[in-house]
Image: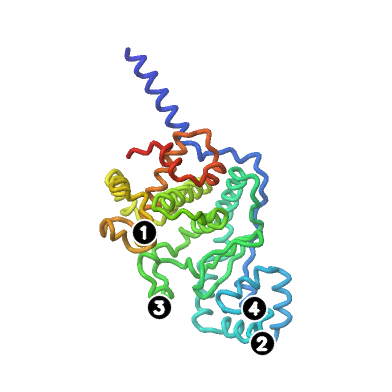
Amino acid sequence: MKINFLFSLAIILMVNSCKQDRLDVDLSKVDAKPLQVMRLENDLFSLSPLNFEKRTLEIKEKYGIIYDHYLMNPLRINGTQDSLYRPMALDFVMNKDVREAYAEVKKVYPNTKLESLMPEVNDMVKRFRFHFPKRAVPHRFITCTTGWSYAFAYLDSSFLISLDMYLGDFSKFYQMLRYPKYQTLKMSPDYLVSDIARGWMLTEFDNNKAENTLLHHTVFYGKLYYAINALLPKAQDSILIGYTGQQLAYCRTYEKKLWGYFAEKNRLYENNLTTIRELTTEGPFTGAISKECPPRIAMWLGWQIVKSYMTNNPEVSMDALMSETDAQKILAKSKYRP
């Protein structure tokens, strides 16, 4: 009897282990070249009144349409053909605060730091190719500074990452700009790769379905974070979703009650935009539930639903998951019961 019990326990543990290892994939046969690292910020800050035209031609040849796209945001101009390009670009690179930020970027992100990040980034790209073999992958990893305009863009087979958005929680620039604490907590090197993964997935799989219910948004973001986790399986959950350890502990402790809040009164089928925003937007907490409840709680709960769905439906590939737009189907087949 004891032997049978131990044998049964072993089988259960084996099954659970198999379920938990869905993201542990074999990349040995995946063909994806390492990304080329390019530092646009160094080229940009080499501009001066004396070399402006010559260096602009060199930069345009080196970066292609990325350079014109980059200029549209921090400088608010329409690329190098804009009549304001020269004065605006020179004003930007000569600005005292911007130059200080560039100096800090060089300090926080020397070439050795980027070299240390690239194995994780290249592994992420290989995992994407494994799960989504029909989709294109990036070839370049381009860093820049944007004067705190934006953090990430993906176009022309390139990641474009603004390093001045990841200088560390206590950066004087973020205090100067009066960024709220809940935002600066995620503006450090620890979050850089996970933010790239999230921005990339949002570009590949946009949330543009006409349906606008809480369930739709909950499951969409659940799929998104499951995909991010698939690309970065070794990253901590708190880093992937941007929660503190305390916030994540709250979610796990009160998961059943959180699910009860969403399930009661058909709240999942609510289409009131105010309600949806309360449960999906950034902030210090989710006020609709409590001041202890982390922000974007619908996203975390959706992640748990999708985890359950993928565990209980092993035949569903990552590609099939991201292509599935029927949120009700995912919820029903997830058998989610915290």
Q: CA distance from mark 3 to mark 4?
A: 26 Å
For disc 2, the marked residue is 49
The amino acid marked with disc number 2 is Pro
Q: Please report whichever mark, 1 or 3, sits nearer to the chain's N-terminal start.
A: 3
Element type at marker 3? Answer: helix
Q: Is residue 217 above or below residue 142?
A: above
Q: Answer whether labels 4 and 1 touch (C-beta < 8 Å).
A: no
Quickly name the residue at label 3.
176
Mark 2–mark 4 Cα distance, whole angstroms, equals 10 Å
Kind of element beneath mark 4: loop
Identify the amino acid type marked 1.
Asn
Mark 3: few, some, or many residues within 10 Å (few <14, many ≥20)? few
Task: Please name the residue shown 69% across and 80% down the image.
Answer: 81
3D distance between C-alphas at marks 3 and 2: 29 Å
Marking on residue 205: none
Q: Which mark is residue 46?
A: 4
Residue assigned mark 1: 272
Q: Quadrant of residue 286?
A: bottom left
Query: In this picture, is 19 found above or below 260?
Result: above
Question: Residue 257: x, y in percent?
Answer: 27, 46
Callout in the foreground (2, 1): 1
- Where does the N terminus fall, quadrant-wise? top left
Q: CA distance from mark 2 to mark 1?
A: 54 Å
